[in-house]
Amino acid sequence: MRKHLRLGLPCLAAAVMMLVPSGPGALAAPAGGEDVTVYVGSGGASLAGLSGKSLLRAAGKAGLTAQSPVRSLRDAQAVLEARHTKNATIMLRGGTYTDAGVEWGPGIASGTVTLKAQPGTGPVTFDGRAAKAGYWTKVGPTSPKLNFQGPYTVQRYGDGGLKATGTKKDGPVKGLVVNRITFKQIGNAWVKSGKGYAGVQLNYVSKAKITNNSFVNLENKTVPGNTHGVYLAFNQTQKTPGSNENLVKGNTFQVVSGDPVRASDGSSGNKVQNNVFKKGRDYKGKTRGNGNYGMFTYWVFPRANTCGKGGNTFSGNTYTVNYYNKKAPAVRSGSKTGRTCKSVKDTGGNTYKR
């Protein structure tokens, strides 16, 4: 995996002051809090290995036009950090990218970062086969607000697509938007060394909007029930609260070997609305549906041993048989500890189609 060296903001500011005293050809200091558009293309310029003045000079020019893109998401992050960005748009040129494990840390931007496909340049695909395991990207509570706007495809990542994790110190991840992305062929049925957790994994996240996405062939060959389309949980290491008041709406789930939407660890107030759960072909070509126990389930584990506080609802959805081609309930609560919960409710308007 390509590694990019980054300057912390204090060092970066000091380097800018050193570079811009006066004189013709001196690098202009970045305006504080500016809005920036960065263009990314698979054949663009790489900032890998650059530091100090070299990084600043390259980041001051690269990626700022469609004709001079940078090569990867990490390169785009370096450009944004160097320019003291407020809000940013990252335009993705059509092509295949191998970015993996991309973390959105503090200092990249102070406002919102939107990732979009550049119109008229062809389909955008992020392919994780070279990484063999892990996630496509990770978001934390000190990240800029992330707005992932497709259409683009995230495929062949062993552990999952997007993972967002809050902390006790900084609170939950807020303001996350994931829209019109296809998450496909994730899990150890597709990537041998993968663990296959989820297309979108929310660990202590509040008020995220997961809308109009497709979750296709998220399958584990080993422990098939462990992979999900959307997983709503807590930060297990820090024992935070769960993920609350998130919206999962207008998505399509097709052949997910674990329950397609799963909540646990006290997660509450999450709404699963107007989604379609349908059949398709699995990794062996067999026709299957989604999940084992239900379409939206809440499960109690020894790590937290707590029920949800209410408000997890399932409404207006269309669903079919489970991954084993048997009829399963729309919603279900279960437990590994013997604790009895009713932490998910069917609130009506759901249609079962064989």
Image (spheres, rainbow, N blue to C red):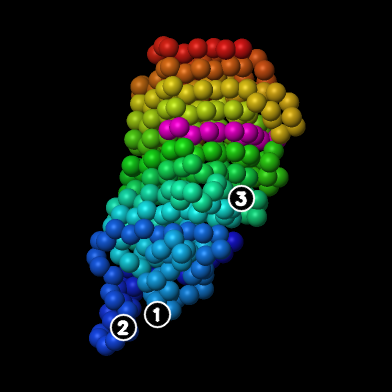
Q: Which quadrant would residue 188 be assigned to in this image?
A: top right
Which is more N-terminal, label 3 or label 2? 2
Q: Where does residue 142 sit, x and y in percent of width and height?
A: 34, 52
Which residue is painted at 51% across and 51% down in the image? 121
Q: Secondary structure at mark 2?
A: loop
Mark 2 crowd level (few <14, some 14–19, many ≥20, 10 Å Cα) = few
- The reply to whether discs 1 and 2 touch (Cβ–Cβ < 8 Å) is no
Residue 92 on the magenta segment = no
How far is the residue under mark 3 from the one under mark 1?
32 Å
Which residue is painted at 29% across and 86% down in the image? 24
> Which residue appears farthest toward the bottom when viewing the image?
23
The total number of labels drawn is: 3
Q: Which quadrant would residue 189 be assigned to in this image?
A: top right
- Of the two numbered discs 2 and 3 in the rendering, the one whose residue sits closer to the viewer: 2
How far is the residue under mark 2 from the one under mark 3?
40 Å
Q: Nearer the viewer, residue 168 or 217?
A: 217
Q: Is residue 319 left or right of residue 130?
A: left
The quadrant of the rendering that contains the C terminus is top right
Query: What label sits on residue 26 in the rendered view?
Result: 2
* Residue underneath mark 1: 53
| Residue 343 visible in rendering | no
Q: Which residues are magenta?
A: 211-222
